[in-house]
Image (tube, rainbow, N blue to C red):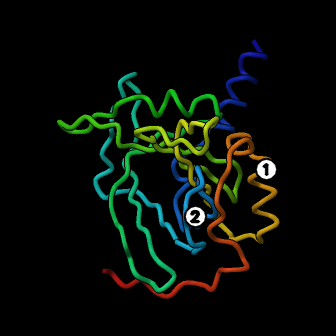
Amino acid sequence: MWKLITLYFVTVVHATKLENFYGEWYQAAFYPVSSYAPVCIQYSFSPTSDNVQCTYADGNNATLMQMTIMTDKGQIIQNSPLPVMIVETPDEVMPALNMTCTYGDQETRGHVVIRLVNDNYFIMFHDNEPFIETSNAEVEQNAAFLFVKNVVSESELLQAMMTIEDLKRRRGGMMCVKENYHGFSTANKV
């Protein structure tokens, strides 16, 4: 009996909550690699005012999270709700992305899957339709964005990209590191 109680306690303690993703984050890297100019973009995630639930095909719920994207000049370039599903392991990503999500009377595959790596990193995955081919041998099953809470150096980001299980066998492009981060102005809605 004590083993069952211990297992339950460990599971509850390690379950990732949506609140872990709230706040200001910076897009540090993206996958697969394409043409880009390294730039720092700030994302802000918060609860939506109506907290609508989306129901996945398997009966589980996703929550709408408010996503605001801001340039380093303080311009808000997107402010919209985003249906999200939280996963705990890399193996859960593709099955979660392959599900449809229904909210209200709309059914969509337009949701993201998020996985908290640690207090400073999380990964946001979304569908690639059609799949993106990065070379003759590679077909990317999804697109991924690596976010940081606190901007790190280029060498620290490279180390993270090479060791995070979901990303270490993929080619990614660095976006925001200390070497190109110049802070952010206050928000100006566009």
Answer left or right for 50 relative to 86. left
In this rendering, the label closer to the viewer, 2 or 1: 1
Residue type at mark 1 is Met
Answer left or right for 61 relative to 116. left
Q: Which quadrant, please, contains the N terminus?
A: top right
The percent coordinates of residue 178 (x first, y second) are 72, 77
Q: Nearer the viewer, residue 107 or 8?
A: 107
Residue type at mark 2 is Gln
At x 58%, y 50%, the residue is 32
Q: Residues within 10 Å of mark 2 (few under 14, many from 20)?
A: many
Please tell me whether mark 2 sits on a helix, a strand or a loop. strand
Determine the image quadrant of residue 2.
top right
Answer left or right for 120 relative to 36. right
Please tell me whether mark 1 sits on a helix, a strand or a loop. helix
At x 75%, y 62%, the residue is 157
Q: Which quadrant, please, contains the C terminus?
A: bottom left
Determine the image quadrant of residue 60.
top left
Distance CA(mark 2)–CA(mark 1): 17 Å
Name above or below for residue 182 compared with residue 97: below
Q: Residues within 10 Å of mark 1 (few under 14, many from 20)?
A: some
Q: Are marks 2 and 1 in contact (CB under 8 Å)?
A: no
At x 81%, y 57%, the residue is 159
The percent coordinates of residue 48 (x first, y second) are 35, 57
Residue 162 - label: 1
Determine the image quadrant of residue 57.
top left
The percent coordinates of residue 83 (x first, y second) are 38, 46
Q: Nearer the viewer, residue 126 or 8?
A: 126
Kindly identify which residue carries mark 2. 27
